[in-house]
Image (cartoon, coloured by chain):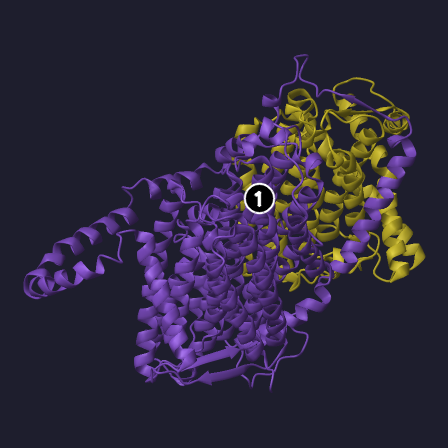
Amino acid sequence: MTFGAVSIVLISIAISAVGAIVALLFKSNFSLNKNLSSVIGIVAALYGIYAGFLGMTGQGELVSYATPFPFASLSLLVNPLSGLLLFVLSLLALVAWIYGLSYMDEYKKQGAMTFGFFMHTFILSMALVVLADNAFWFLVFFELMSLTSYFLVTIEQSKASTHAGLMYMVMAHAGLLMIMAAFLMFGSQAGSLEFEAFRQTQLSPVLASTVFLLTFIGFGIKAGMIPFHSWLPLAHPSAPSNISALMSGGMIKIGIFGIVKVAFDLLQGSEQMIWWGIVIIGFGAVSSLLGIIYALVENDVKRFLAYSSVENIGIILLGVGVSLVGVASGNNVLAILGLAGGLFHLLNHAVFKGLLFLGAGSITFAAHTKNMELLGGLGRLMPITATCFLIGSLAISALPPLNGFVSEWLIYQGLFNSIMSEGIVVMIVSAVAIVALALTGALAVTCFVKAYGVSFAGSPRSDQAANAKEVPAPMKIAMLILAVFCVILGVGAHFIVPVFSSIAKATALSQGAEVTASVALVNPASSAFTSTFVIAVVLLIAILVARLIHNIFGGNQFGEKVALPWATGYKPDVEMAVTATTFATGVEHFYDFFYDLRRNLSSGKGGVARAFDSIVNGARNIEPVSDKYLVDDTVRDVESMSEKIRRIASGDFQKYVLYIVGALIVLLALAVIL
Amino acid sequence: MLINALLGFIQALLLLLLTPLFTGISRKLRARIQTRKGAPILQDYYDLAKLFSRQEMVTKNAGPIFKWMPAIYLGSYFAIAMGLPLLTANSPIPFLADVITIIYLLAVPRFFFALASIDTSSSFAGVGGVRELIVSTLVEPGMMLSLIVVALLAGTTSITEISIMNLTGNIPALMAFVVAGIAFAYCTYIELGKLPYDLAEAEQELQEGPLTEYSGASLAFLKLGMGLKQLVMLGLFIAIFLPFGASLDGSFISVVLAAVILIVEILVIYFIVGIIENVVARVRFANASHQIWVSLGIASLAFVFLIVGI
């Protein structure tokens, strides 16, 4: 095992670290910096993809390095689950770097010098979170990930992005706090912060449930699950689009990863409970339905995509929840079916959401607006972007034979089986979830017809849109890579689903459990499974033959005549055509209940907001008490010291955060060097 | 496998070729109810032949989506029709005959139908496209739940197995099955686009909505496609709830007999649908949701019956 998966990841991480340093060194030369960073990033990402692939198909490899801190040896674990995440993150990193070669020119004026540095550190910290098998380091890397991404969110340095960044910081830390509390509780029982020790520990049911709930909410915030999603539609659209792709496709998956890791892996020594799974299914159903409903009324293409991420996180959670019900009730079929569906959807969502965010980036690159009302008719001007965006839209709408369909099909099968096999509560919750998922599916189709139709079809509604040009080659290549993945993961499902069932098996079941090899592929009750390949062939042949007949009989026989659209005799006007608002008003009319819900929750006087206010006020009142007895003396000493510190501290929030990043990196370097 | 695929092809072709006949009968029926003489039953064949020989008009700025849509629309319904277990109880292409797969397959033509309507830049077409999508979001939950209930009864989502369960009379909870059938029939009726739910292609309201800007062969394709869509929806209903004719052994005689029974069944349903659509008034689009949500209510009732086991 000279070159195991762990070594290869470490190579990838080391290359990223070199990239970060290089980005700092060549600060003055924009294009050199950009090209060098990107090339290094591409190499690192390729290593990451390879390592992820090895991890997914391998047995699991744990490497532990001693550090100066006796409680926290740097344990790194590559197993099928973390391998999958590595693969997802590295794939997105790869396309983000390629895309950035041209796209980052847009950010020349806006502090893009540091872009290379933060993107490298962001990617490497995500990889380390996934690998870490020690609670201490997990938290350190998790924090590093949040901080570096904060800088990427605020890279535009506009008012909106600064606000988004602040919101993001607050939410990220609320989540971190919960996870930290859970890990400390767990650690005190296990007597160690090593995850390996966690796995051996049996917690009491109450403690186990507390740990589960704390981490579920903590990671749920990171994942953007409703009702903890408010930061996501602010933060993701503010970042440059290739970074939005990395965040929306990759980073929020770390939230899912955390939930799966804690519930299935770390808590395996304790008894997992069925109601945990029910809670996850419940949150999943709500997130998927509300996410897509809120997405429908967005006119900003990137906010729209961010809300759709909330929806897809919900769908993934449905699979995870079903699986947890299966694990808790000892139903191995359910455990594998659900988790395979959830994890496959995790990969799929990374691919098509990455693609769509890159597409949105191309729209802003070409037309300089994110507002779909001002777009239209881009399909003829930017054919490659349009085709890629169309493939992404079809895939995310779960239309067969593309990849989104396969994973949703598996999740449906998981829910279906959980209705059949478990108690009445699970039965009803799963049925509600199926209905929610069906409604979500129909709404997703509506949503993405809107996104594609309003942006790319029809006539341009502004000069910006009319003068748009196709984007440069690197951006096209990045989108094409992901578009090809959408097709391969869908049509090749026959070969890919077994990989996911083995990942699910390795994650959800303890070593001893034996399940027939093909269980996740085959619906056990029907022994019929879906074959997207056959569906693709039948569909394609039927459509092509139809087109051929169309051409023979008339289509091109007499030629076409171009005319203006009919408008009851008036002169047609672009204002008359369908816009994003047409969809919004229609949907708002029929689903007003959900929008009322949202208005009431966010009006500031709702229950949640009031509770938050009272907590803040309470904390404010308690604050002076400790001042009086503890702080006042210390303050005098500190003040003299802070005179000296003031030279390096300039009072800029960004800089403070930067210091923390620096401190974390030093800590990491210490651990590696010593 | 190949023989089966051929059978699926013949089945879909049969439905496609009969499409204008059924729509023609439907027209005739409406005329008779309104005490008119009406056009000949074969009129829709003449119309199609005429359309195929006409020049096409394309709106300014319309792109490839607009031009490809008629083929995609007709082609996808044809593909779906190939998979339904109509003539034989075993689906010719089992991968297509899964209740979840089929609901998502039905979204493929709808996606492009609505997209092309936006691509025309015409407001009538666009509004029709949006309506088509919104109506589907209202119908889909009830449709999915009623299908899930029958799938649960059969213990599988495969339509073939559900068909066979029905044919052999081994239904564990008959009441649940019947109520699910009512819910699904209601959903199917809405999807047929007949009055009172003629919303997306409403002639009087929206100038046939998404069809507004189509002409010539494209229009012929869409007319055929919409007729085939009706038959596919009915076929799905028949395959699951009324698979009486479907051949279990697949012998030639039984398949021919199945085809005859299928045609009779469709005729009867068309007759019933024709009477309903001629005695009701169009529902206002804004109020449609109150009625359509009822389908989810009925399906939920079926689910309750399923839990109770009656």
Quick check: A204 above or below B185? below
Camera sees residue A347: no
Q: Which residue lies most toward the top here?
A: A569
Residue beneath disc 1: A360
Name the side, left or right, on which A283 lies relative to A487: left
Q: Quadrant of the N terminus of chain A?
A: bottom right
x and y percentages locating residue A7 in the rendered image = 56, 79
Name the side, left or right, on which B310 lies relative to A496: left
Of A580 and A330, the residue lying toward us = A580
Camera sees residue A661: yes
Q: Quadrant of residue A442?
A: top right
Quick check: A139 above or below B235? below
Q: Quadrant of the C terminus of chain A?
A: bottom left
x and y percentages locating residue B289 in the rendered image = 53, 35
Numbered-mark total: 1
Which color was chain A given?
purple
Of B262 and B69, the residue lying toward us = B69
Name the side, left or right, on which B180 lies relative to A650: right
At x 91%, y 33%, the residue is A553
Q: Which residue lies most toward the right here?
A: B252
Mark 1 residue type = Ala
At x 71%, y 27%, the residue is B61
At x 41%, y 66%, the residue is A142
Task: Report in which chain the residue with disc 1 lies.
Answer: A
x and y percentages locating residue A409 in the rendered image = 63, 59
Quick check: B132 above or below A31? above
Chain ID for yellow: B
Name the side, left or right, on which B162 lies relative to A328: right
Of A572 and A602, the residue lying toward us = A572
Quick check: B134 above or below B141? above
Label 1 SS: helix
